[in-house]
Image (cartoon, rainbow, N blue to C red):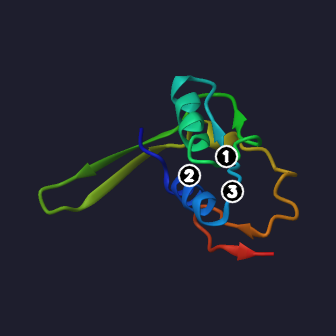
Amino acid sequence: MILASMQSFAAVAARLTGGARLLCRVGDDRIGEALVDEIASEGVDVSVVQRGGRTGSIVVLVDEFGERTFLSDRGASLLLDSPDPLRQVPLLLRAGFRAHAG
């Protein structure tokens, strides 16, 4: 299974600090379940992971010159609810944004 960048970051953070929590939304399907199980096995707290819909995916096309094109289906992540569990966290990293220490 391939983890997305945010899940990989959470796994490294858990190893370095002894704890990390991942908030995301995965599909209520086998792929979503496998992704959550895999990241949980890395010591990441997945208690606030939301489930429903179908798990998103990305297809990467690479041409003969090494140029990449990404085709994305955000799936369940489009339905992510506004989370209360992010209040009072010491470090927050959101996809597409810089880390924020609070």
Q: Describe residue 7's horizontal placement relative to residue 3 as left or right.
A: right
Picture residue at 50% right of the left edge, 57% below the top: 5
Q: Which mark is residue 20?
A: 3
Question: Residue under circle 2?
Answer: 7
68, above or below 49, in the image: below
Label 3's element? loop
Q: Tell me the kind of residue under disc 1.
A: Cys
Observer-side mark, 1 or 3, equals 3
- The total of numbered circles placed on residues is 3
Which of the 4 quarters of the picture holds residue 97? Answer: bottom right
Observer-side mark, 2 or 3, equals 3
Which of the 4 quarters of the picture holds residue 46? Answer: top right
Picture residue at 75% right of the left edge, 76% below the top: 101
Question: Residue under circle 1?
Answer: 24
> What distance separates the C-alpha of mark 1 from that of mark 3?
13 Å
In depth, the one of 94 and 59 nearer the eye is 94
Judge the density around disc 1: few (<14), some (14-19), many (≥20) Cα neighbours within 10 Å. Answer: many
52, above or below 71, in the image: above
Question: Where is the C terminus found, in terms of image quarters?
Answer: bottom right
In depth, the one of 25 and 2 nearer the eye is 2
Label 1's element? loop
Picture residue at 58% right of the left edge, 65% below the top: 96
